[in-house]
């Protein structure tokens, strides 16, 4: 654990919701409803996805799952859980890939009208790394780890622009949860304006467990929410990770309670909040001044 973290007496703040004055974020609410058990089916997922990453058909999906390539989700038609599809679902469960039960219209939309035989997989736009990889990248450069945590950001455009901001501020990587989050689709890649190619992204099962691991590695955890310390008057302790919350709910309660400091952006005008990528730009570029 770093001397900064061991010796500092900074107070832990636990406050409420968004990045400005109100108690709600101004984002579009697109929460993903998925089971907490990896690979278990759940009613239809409302997350916006892109057909460029879709692989359709039983043989094609089976080969994709066996290939070891990163897969964000497997969608299965309602009621079609027998034969080859049952075997594919079992393989997906073994790899911890979420399986989502969906209607025919959803599957048709996902694969752009291609014959899907009741199953469609969404492949990731790039390979995910591990949190340990991100820490190693920073330390191999002789730098203090500077990490962004996206706590359930569902809008792929917001995730893409957050990745762009993280790259611009010099962050070493970004962490997203396996469920209830946008994933690395072509939409995210386009919104990042090329930054996705340069920012390592780790996908984890549990954000709170990951935060505990980062604390043991000596990182300070800062969450962006209302009611906290003015970001501009805050001296950032390093190394550090910065948490930005979902469009509808902000940073989740347990994550806030597990954070060391809550940072807020004082709002001067008539609107009471910024969207997640704008708030991240303000806070991360401020924080970048404290990293060597």
Image (spheres, helix red, strand yellow):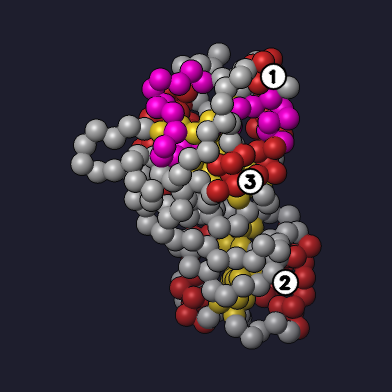
- Asked if 17 appears above or below 145 in the picture, the reply is below
Image quadrant of residue 97? bottom right
Left or right: 118 as drawn, with respect to 51: right
Task: State the mark number for residue 89.
Answer: 2
1 or 2: tag closer to the N-terminus: 1
Q: Are marks 2 and 3 in contact (CB under 8 Å)?
A: no
Please provide percent x and percent y for residue 196. 51, 40
Which residue is under mark 1? Answer: 6
SS label for mark 1? helix
- Dot 2 crowding, Cα within 10 Å, few <14, some 14–19, many 20+: many
3 or 1: tag closer to the N-terminus: 1
- Dot 3 crowding, Cα within 10 Å, few <14, some 14–19, many 20+: many
Please provide percent x and percent y for residue 72. 61, 58
Please provide percent x and percent y for residue 122. 58, 62
Mark 2 or 3: in front is: 3
Residue shown at the point (44%, 46%) measured from the top left: 17
Q: Is residue 146 visible?
A: no
Disc 2 versus disc 3: distance between alpha carbons?
25 Å
Image quadrant of residue 141? top right
Depth check, front residue: 152 or 66: 152
Q: Is residue 46 visible?
A: yes
Q: Report if residue 115 lies within the magenta region.
A: no
Which residue is under mark 3? Answer: 207
- Asked if 70 appears above or below 91 in the picture, the reply is above
- Quarter of the figure with the N terminus: top right
Question: Which contiguous range is marked in magenta?
Answer: 213-236
SS label for mark 2? helix
- Quarter of the figure with the C terminus: top right
């Amino acid at each position: 654990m770093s001397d900064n973290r061991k010796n500092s007496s900074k107070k832990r703040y636990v406050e409420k919701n968004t990045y400005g004055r109100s108690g709600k974020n101004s984002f579009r609410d697109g929460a993903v409803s998925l089971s907490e058990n990896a690979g278990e089916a759940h009613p239809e997922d409302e997350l916006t996805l892109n057909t460029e990453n879709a692989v359709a058909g039983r043989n094609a999906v089976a080969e994709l799952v066996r290939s070891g390539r990163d897969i964000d989700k497997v969608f299965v038609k309602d009621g079609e859980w027998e034969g080859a599809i049952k075997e594919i679902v079992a393989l997906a469960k073994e790899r911890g890939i979420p399986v989502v039960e969906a209607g025919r219209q959803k599957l048709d939309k996902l694969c752009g009208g291609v014959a899907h035989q009741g199953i469609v997989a969404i492949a990731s736009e790039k390979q995910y790394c591990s949190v340990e990889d991100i820490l190693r990248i920073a330390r191999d450069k002789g730098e203090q780890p500077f990490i962004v945590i996206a706590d359930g950001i569902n809008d792929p455009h917001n995730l893409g622009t957050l990745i762009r901001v993280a790259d611009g501020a010099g962050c070493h990587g970004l962490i997203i949860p396996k469920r209830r989050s946008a994933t690395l689709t072509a939409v995210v890649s386009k919104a990042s304006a090329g930054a996705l190619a340069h920012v390592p992204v780790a996908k984890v099962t549990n954000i709170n467990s990951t935060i505990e691991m980062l604390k043991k590695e000596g990182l300070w955890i800062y969450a962006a929410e209302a009611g906290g310390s003015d970001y501009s008057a805050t001296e950032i302790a390093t190394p550090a990770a910065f948490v930005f919350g979902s469009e509808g709910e902000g940073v989740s309660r347990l994550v806030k309670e597990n954070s060391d400091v809550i940072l807020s952006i004082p709002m001067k005008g008539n609107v009471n909040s910024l969207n997640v990528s704008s708030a991240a730009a303000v806070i991360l570029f401020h924080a970048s001044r404290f990293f060597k």
